Image: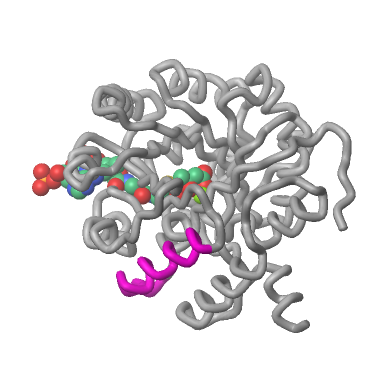
Amino acid sequence: MAYRMEGLPERVTVYEVGPRDGLQNESAIVPVEVKAEFIDRLADAGHTVVEATSFVHPKWVPQLADAAELLGRLDRRPGVRYPVLVPNERGLDRALELGVTEIAIFASATETFAAKNLNRTLESQFDMFEPVVARALEHGLDVRAYVSMCFGDPWEGPTPIEQVVAVGERLAGVGCYQLSLGDTIGVGTPGHVTALIGAFGGPDRLAVHFHDTYGQALGNTLAALKAGVTTVDASTGGIGGCPYAESATGNLATEDLVWMLRGLGIETGLDLDKLVSTSTWLAERLGRPSSSRVVQALAKG
Ligand code: HMG
Ligand code: MG
């Protein structure tokens, strides 16, 4: 039984980041065949977009150093997109060689995180990203852009909204089809989400990416939906975080998001039972229980 609320979209795209944002933060390196099966299971559950891996420097994120091998093993389904994270032209070359059709760049809204995550300044990150976007577009790729630390930064405190908008507009201006607003350390609250989306002039091109460190991710998502956003990032079992941001614990869990959306009568095309069994399967491989509340509740029942 669904109970709709006024002012929410009919349909939401869940942009699954578990294989990338989730597995990049695991202390153990997950075998490539487990990663490939994970992605296949996500497609089986009805996902239409699964961020598969990253073409970053393998020394920076050894957990995803097998990106090329993983892409070779993927059983690509028609109708499913498999974007990958790319920071620079070296990463783009590697992705193009493998026939990738969609990439995501990842900018910082703050100076300190640009240094820690990208080894660049806030300004010089654009010198790295702009040629990547230009060349990717020439090759016919779709380019998504993340903006990290949109709400606060562990070193700098709250992030000024105008600073986030300036970074986001610059990336949209060079041709990124979507901006995913990242609450990398999970400090945002619903009114802040509404204010940020308003400062962008509305939801066009915006997606949201909430880490759940302070338990705000679902509330923040509802605020984003009310503001008109229709793409929400989430991660199987809430795994994930950025190795270069203190306290960037778990993403919004896909199963918790889908439970809420299903209850609101919002279509996602996802099969919650299959998502839960994938989350339980993954938890066994990672050696710890799924932190999704919905998975815990349904597994008990
Ligand atoms: P750098 O050290 O400044 O790189 O790192 P460089 O351009 O000076 O190059 C140094 C060497 O690295 C060169 O090799 C390059 O070829 C090589 P050498 O000539 O010395 O032999 N190199 C590469 N090799 C393979 N693939 C590459 C690559 N690039 C350079 N792509 C760089 C700069 C951006 C590469 C580095 O800082 C990096 O890899 N950072 C990635 C960090 C990361 O992946 N963080 C997690 C993802 S972001 C996130 O999780 C947040 C998000 O979820 C949203 C949110 O939650 O807010 C997206
Ligand atoms: Mg993230």
- Residue 76, above or below 170: below
> Residue 49: percent from the left, percent from the top?
48, 48
- Residue 10, above or below 294: above
Quadrant hosting ligand 1: top left
Residue at the farthest front position: 78
Q: Residue at left 44%, top 34%?
A: 144
Q: How many marks?
A: 0
In the image, 278 versus 17, the foreground residue is 278
Q: Quadrant of the N terminus?
A: bottom right
Is 247 situated left or right of 170 in this image?
right
Name the colouring of the figure.
one colour
- Asked if the magenta segment contains residue 43, the reply would be yes
In the image, 182 versus 95, the foreground residue is 95
Q: Main secondary structure of the magenta part?
A: helix
Q: Quadrant of the C terminus?
A: bottom right
> Residue 124: percent from the left, percent from the top?
32, 26
- Residue 165, above or below 297: above
- Quarter occupied by residue 85: top left
Q: Residue at left 51%, top 25%?
A: 168
Is 230 situated left or right of 38 in this image?
right
In the image, 121 versus 86, the foreground residue is 86
Q: Residue at left 75%, top 46%?
A: 266
Magenta segment: 27-44
In the image, 46 versus 215, the foreground residue is 46
- Residue 66, above or below 291: above
- Asked if the magenta segment contains residue 56, the reply would be no
> Residue 12: percent from the left, percent from the top?
66, 42
> Residue 235: percent from the left, percent from the top?
56, 58
